[in-house]
Image (spheres, rainbow, N blue to C red):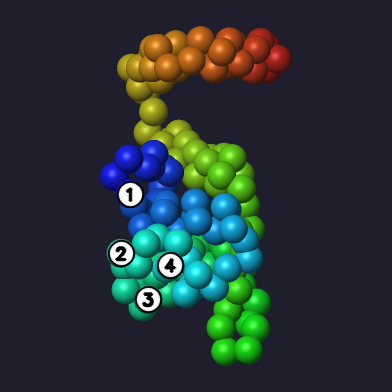
Amino acid sequence: MNSMKPIPGLGPLETAVMLAVWKAPPATVREIQQSLGGSHAYTTVMTTMTRLHQKGLLSRKLEGTAFRYTAKVDRGGWLQRWSRSVIESLMPSLDEGSVAYFVSEANKTSPELLAALRRALQERE
């Protein structure tokens, strides 16, 4: 799990669970626990999946005595939802220095992202 790329807004176990559900939906808690190599207790995985359901990332359907979980969003959908939430919470407190830092980081990370930002600004002028 240490080599796994984290998913922003999710903890390490939540990330592992979501990756497992995206790989093999629909799945029960037991199936996800086994796909994680049995490295976590069943109740720990169950609690994590319940929380992911409460966060709106997983849907579940009762089959017999167990829930089958499926992802409500794909990885891209989650990243978009999470980033919007972060940006909305930051906007009221941003200053010129913060914006300049964002632009600098966007340029370092992805010139394409900076180009998209330029286009979006031009469309609003």
Per the image, the residue denoted by label 4 is 34
- Tell me which numbered mark, 2 or 1, is placed earlier along the sequence: 1
Residue at the location (29% across, 45% down)? Answer: 2
Classify mark 3: residues with Cα within 10 Å, few (<14), some (14-19) or many (20+). some
Per the image, the residue denoted by label 3 is 42
C-alpha separation, residue under disc 4 versus residue under disc 2: 8 Å
The correct choice, above or below, for 27 with respect to 3 in the image is below
Whether tag 4 and tag 1 are in contact, CB under 8 A, the answer is no
Please tell me whether mark 1 sits on a helix, a strand or a loop: loop
Please tell me whether mark 3 sits on a helix, a strand or a loop: helix
Residue at the location (57% across, 63% down)? Answer: 58
Mark 3 belongs to which amino acid?
Answer: Tyr
Q: Foreground residue, 55 or 20?
A: 20
Whether tag 3 and tag 4 are in contact, CB under 8 A, the answer is no
Please tell me whether mark 2 sits on a helix, a strand or a loop: loop
C-alpha separation, residue under disc 2 versus residue under disc 3: 9 Å
Give left or right: position of 118 versus 41.
Answer: right
Q: Foreground residue, 3 or 114?
A: 3
Query: Mark 4 or mark 1, which is nearer to you?
Result: 4
Mark 1 belongs to which amino acid?
Answer: Met
C-alpha separation, residue under disc 2 versus residue under disc 1: 10 Å
Residue at the location (42% across, 52% down)? Answer: 15
Mark 4 belongs to which amino acid?
Answer: Gln
- Tell me which numbered mark, 3 or 4, is placed earlier along the sequence: 4
